[in-house]
Image (spheres, rainbow, N blue to C red):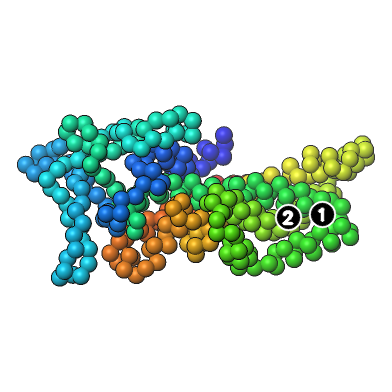
Amino acid sequence: MELIKKIFKDPFAKTAFLVLCILYLIILFADFIAPYSNYYANREMAYAPPSKVYTIDENGKFSRPYTYNYIRKFEPALMQTVFEEDRSQKYYIKPFARGEKYKFLGLIPTDRHLFGVGVNDGADKGGEIHLLGTDINGRDVFSRLLFGGRISMTVGFLSLLIVFPIGLLYGGVSGYFGGIIDNLMMRFAEATMAIPSFYLLIILAAILPSGMTSVQRFSLIIVILALIGWAGFARVVRGMVLSIKKEDFVLAEKTLGASNLRIILKHILPQTTSYVIIAMTLSVPSYILAESGLSFLGLGIQQPDASWGNMLKEAQEFTNILYRPWLLTPGVLIFLAVLSFNLLGDFIRDYLDPKGRTRV
């Protein structure tokens, strides 16, 4: 595909594309890659720092990668809880270790994970590894990042499945018929655009019943985002259709007796494909930020289910930023995902723009 070849020739677009591919592959295989499930918790390990991985033993020789468990202690002099390594037992990092049961890709029951820890006799119990530390409930941050990414990274695409069909058809009909139909449809679209979207999201999310599951909340967030976002897209499509409908091929179709619906769907809307692709790429980051913002405020995905937004909520405390910087990792991933989508969207826009092809 020519577009993919062009992407790999541009260093920024190539990096953005690879980052997004890696993120989506990781969340696709989250059950296998994560050493723990989304709900695993060890309260004794609350706010434990990242596990240190060693490859050189106490004698200075190379060794299989291993780690130590942490012991939680209260330090009276500091008036705070501290963690120290228990050097009495090594726990070796094992590939394809046994752990909690799950269904691989939602289909195949298994208990194998990409990695885990165990002692020399092969037992996997007793040891813990937390590559990015734990949260206030003793849950593994690394594992929850993978599962949280499934929500944060898919909300945009699911919203687009609603936004773009509505926006395309609405804008196409409005631009094609024109006149009073166009005026009425555009006034309604402008009224929808005038609604302060983020505040509406907060109000609607706040009045949702407290007993709703995270899946139900997730579905409603998608619908809410979609019902707000279609109007602006429809206006742009309408403007494109106003110019396209005057082309000779459209007039020829009318002369041949083609129905209005056939002309709109088969001959006019396909001419907006370039803009649709660009708009889809550039719209996903806004949906990711909207979901993360709602979850950060406690109005989106609820604990114990994970999303990058509600995981980042813990990092808003000043003490956590100073002493537990690993809790900021969801924010880093949100930044990387949004930046990558924007870089890729800008490149695709330049590529599909006839005036910009010479710059690619």
- Place of residue 217 in the rendered image (x, y in percent of width and height, measured from the top left): 57, 53
At numbered mark 1, what does the secondary structure look like: helix, strand or loop?
A: helix
The residue carrying mark 1 is 174
* For residue 110, side relative to residue 201 (left or right): left
Q: Residues within 10 Å of mark 2 (few under 14, many from 20)?
A: many
Judge by depth and name the residue closer to the eye, 78 or 343.
Answer: 78
- The residue sitting at 73% across, 50% down in the picture is 166
Residue 353 makes an appearance in the image: no
> Which of the 4 quarters of the picture holds residue 182?
bottom right
Name which of mark 1 and mark 2 comes first in the sequence.
Answer: 1
For this view, does 283 lie left or right of residue 50?
right
Asked if marks 1 and 2 touch (Cβ < 8 Å), the reply is: yes
Q: Quadrant of the N terminus?
A: top right
Instruction: Provide the residue designation for mark 2.
Output: 234
Q: Tell me residue 318's x, y (percent).
A: 34, 70
Please report the residue visible at 77 percent of the width from the left and 52 percent of the height from the top.
170
Q: Residue furthest front?
A: 211
